[in-house]
Amino acid sequence: MLTSLSELPARKAAGPPLAVLTAYDYPMGRLLDEAGADLLLVGDSLGMVVLGLPDTTGVTLDMMCHHTAAVRRGVTRAPVIADLPYHTYRDASEALASARCLVEAGADAVKLEGGVDFVPQVRAIVGAGIPFVGHLGMLPQSVRVEGGYKKKGRTPEDADRLLADALALDAEGACAIVLESMMPEAAEAITRRIRANTIGIGAGPGTDGQVLVTSDLTGAFPWFRPPFARARAAVADEMSRAAREFIADVRGC
């Protein structure tokens, strides 16, 4: 089990693969920490699976700080990564100010979406001593621009662009990079070429670790589950069953 971000290079070199899960509140953070997750991500996916928003673009920095602080209260071992939400890193100064807010809330590292075009922002964050995690491939914050969630790296040109983005983030000192919804061959090529740990989600098995939205893992959000996510529990079913049982008892029927 990981206890510090400083252990990441050794894990890339010798394994085992990193097991990463999302957390959005105190009990979830505490349970996943105690279960042995290597890293916890306070993802802006909370906009959809916790707040009921249509996508992640409506998540604000205040929301992210609120949920990061809640997770931090429950976690004593695993490093906590927090997402920089949409439109909070439009330039280097804004990115650094937003990153500092998340660190003050309890994050050990911050994550933003994008590659070469965001090198100034990454440089400002890393230069201030804040550990940085990248995010390449399908970028949820760009869903409205791209018109949906689309697999990346399908053509040689697209795969080369993803590799260039990964190399740029790696050169700026990223400690890890999430590779989302990417062709497995592209993800494997990136993993071989960079020093940072790669953390896949819908990108095949050839990365240095895997991340999953915990609500997908536990079956807590039954209205949608991505095709690559395997539910290993049925939390929503159990919650509905318990509620129906309580209601029946109260009503005497």
Image: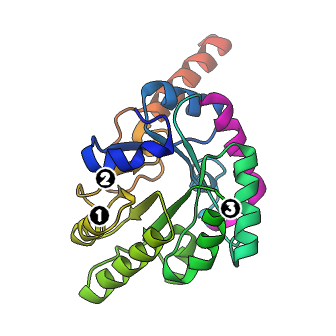
Please tell me whether mark 3 sits on a helix, a strand or a loop. Answer: loop
Q: Position of residue 239 (x, y in %)?
A: 53, 28
> Which portion, as a residue range, is magenta?
57-75
Q: Position of residue 88 (x, y in %)?
A: 71, 69
Q: Position of residue 182 (x, y in %)?
A: 32, 69
Q: Position of residue 206 (x, y in %)?
A: 23, 58
Q: Residues within 10 Å of mark 3 (few under 14, many from 20)?
A: few
- Residue for point 51% across, 70% down: 172
Query: Which residue is nearer to you in this view: 200 or 141?
Result: 200
Q: Amino acid at mark 2?
A: Asp
Q: Which residue is mark 2?
A: 208
| Distance from Cα at disc 3 to Cα at disc 2 | 26 Å
Please tell me whether mark 1 sits on a helix, a strand or a loop. Answer: helix
The quadrant holding residue 137 is: bottom left
In the picture shown, does residue 35 fall above or below 201? above
Q: Which residue is mark 3?
A: 128
Image depth: mark 1 or mark 3 in front = 3
Which badge, 1 or 3, is on the more N-terminal residue?
Answer: 3
- Residue for point 59% across, 31% down: 75
Q: Amino acid at mark 1?
A: Thr
